[in-house]
Image: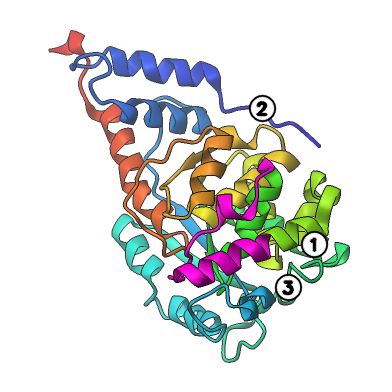
């Protein structure tokens, strides 16, 4: 595992010094000052440039575990939502437009998807097998998915992306994400099971039991992050992990969304130690595993609005806050100038 250096700490200190010298009480802008310093450190310049090229990449896939009753919606919703994103009519599209971000979607494991551009399916691996019965991915499928995510990140960075967001799409995907958080943090199903798309109490209990079954099946193999990801993840989740590691290795920061992205961030930080320092949590979802994963990474969410949509939507909303932080550092006069 290759450790990655953190964002430029000299620039980080310079950004705080600039903020302290501005015409305001020291620390008066609260966390905005730290966020501006983080962006500056990631960019390696102070003050930082405005975030004018923010890209959301949604990773889509089917999860066979959904057939076990862990979702309130049928699997057919997944391909329908891919089309919704392509048409610009999904929740993430609307929110992204409000902050000037762009959205793309890739099918890593949707079982049946017709009438989409070839580019959407060029990294297709296949649906994730039911994690309480067998490993979600073979070792080959895992490596293909990780490589796909890295390629997608490389292309975005080459095209000028300043900030990247991994979005998720797939009925049943909170179950493998919760399993990954539990396995990563040595927890049990009841600790991480959430209501996902809206489970009732009986279904929530079933989900927690299924998570325990999956964790017991995998056992000590979960110690290794790659084996954990293959056994309990999916192609779409693995691709997002590859996307995150690909971004930070190329010096581009990430905004982490809710449960799915937070689970992916935990894996990314294990595969590339230090990756967490290139991340900020855009929001905290209502899923219990989200808060646990973010606390493990030391990430404090920018927003907490009770959201649980996925797609990268909560992370997108935080971009406006980041740009406000940058504007304050760039535009507020120095006290010595007044």
- In magenta, the rendered stretch is 185-211
Q: Does the magenta stretch include residue 206?
A: yes
Q: Name the residue under label 2.
A: 5
Tell me, yes or no, if residue 13 can be seen here: yes
Task: Classify mark 3: helix, strand or loop.
Answer: loop
The disc, 1 or 3, on the residue closer to the chain's N-terminal end is 3
**Is disc 1 surrounded by few (<14), some (14 to 19) or many (20+) residues within 10 Å?**
many
Q: Name the residue under label 1.
A: 142
The disc, 1 or 2, on the residue closer to the chain's N-terminal end is 2
Q: Name the residue under label 3.
A: 130
Measured as percent of width and height from the top left, residue 127 is found at 71, 76
Measured as percent of width and height from the top left, residue 155 is found at 63, 57
Q: Do the residues labelled 1 and 2 touch (CB within 8 Å)?
A: no
Q: Which of the two residues, 101 or 233, is positioned nearer the viewer here?
A: 233
Task: Classify mark 2: helix, strand or loop.
Answer: loop
Q: Are marks 3 and 2 in contact (CB under 8 Å)?
A: no
């Amino acid at each position: 595992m290759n450790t990655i250096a953190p964002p430029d700490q000299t620039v980080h200190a310079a950004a705080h010094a600039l903020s302290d010298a501005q015409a305001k009480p020291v620390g008066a802008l609260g966390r905005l000052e730290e966020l501006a310093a983080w962006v500056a450190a990631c960019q390696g310049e102070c003050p930082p440039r405005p975030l004018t090229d923010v890209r959301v990449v949604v990773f889509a896939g089917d999860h066979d575990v959904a057939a076990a009753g862990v979702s309130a919606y049928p699997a057919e919703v997944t391909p329908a939502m891919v089309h919704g994103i392509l048409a610009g009519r999904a929740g993430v599209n609307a929110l992204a437009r409000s902050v000037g971000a762009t959205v793309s979607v890739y099918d890593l494991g949707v079982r049946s998807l017709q009438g989409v551009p070839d580019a959407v399916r060029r990294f297709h691996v296949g649906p994730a097998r039911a994690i309480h019965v067998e490993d979600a991915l073979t070792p080959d499928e895992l490596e293909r998915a990780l490589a796909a995510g890295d390629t997608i990140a490389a292309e975005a960075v080459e095209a000028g992306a300043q900030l990247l967001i991994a979005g998720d799409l797939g009925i049943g995907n909170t179950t493998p994400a919760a399993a990954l958080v539990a396995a990563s943090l040595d927890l049990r199903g009841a600790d991480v099971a959430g209501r996902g798309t809206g489970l009732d109490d009986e279904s929530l209990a079933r989900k927690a039991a299924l998570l325990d079954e999956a964790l017991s099946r995998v056992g000590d193999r979960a110690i290794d992050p790659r084996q954990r990801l293959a056994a309990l993840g999916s192609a779409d989740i693995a691709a997002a992990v590859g996307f995150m590691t690909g971004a930070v290795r190329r010096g581009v920061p990430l905004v982490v969304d809710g449960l799915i992205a937070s689970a992916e961030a935990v894996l990314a930080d294990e595969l590339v130690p230090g990756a967490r320092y290139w991340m900020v949590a855009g929001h905290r979802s209502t899923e219990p595993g989200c808060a646990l994963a973010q606390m493990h990474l030391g990430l404090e969410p920018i927003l907490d609005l009770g959201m649980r949509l996925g797609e990268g939507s909560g992370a997108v909303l935080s971009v406006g806050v980041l740009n406000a932080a940058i504007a304050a550092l760039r535009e507020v006069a120095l006290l010595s100038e007044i």
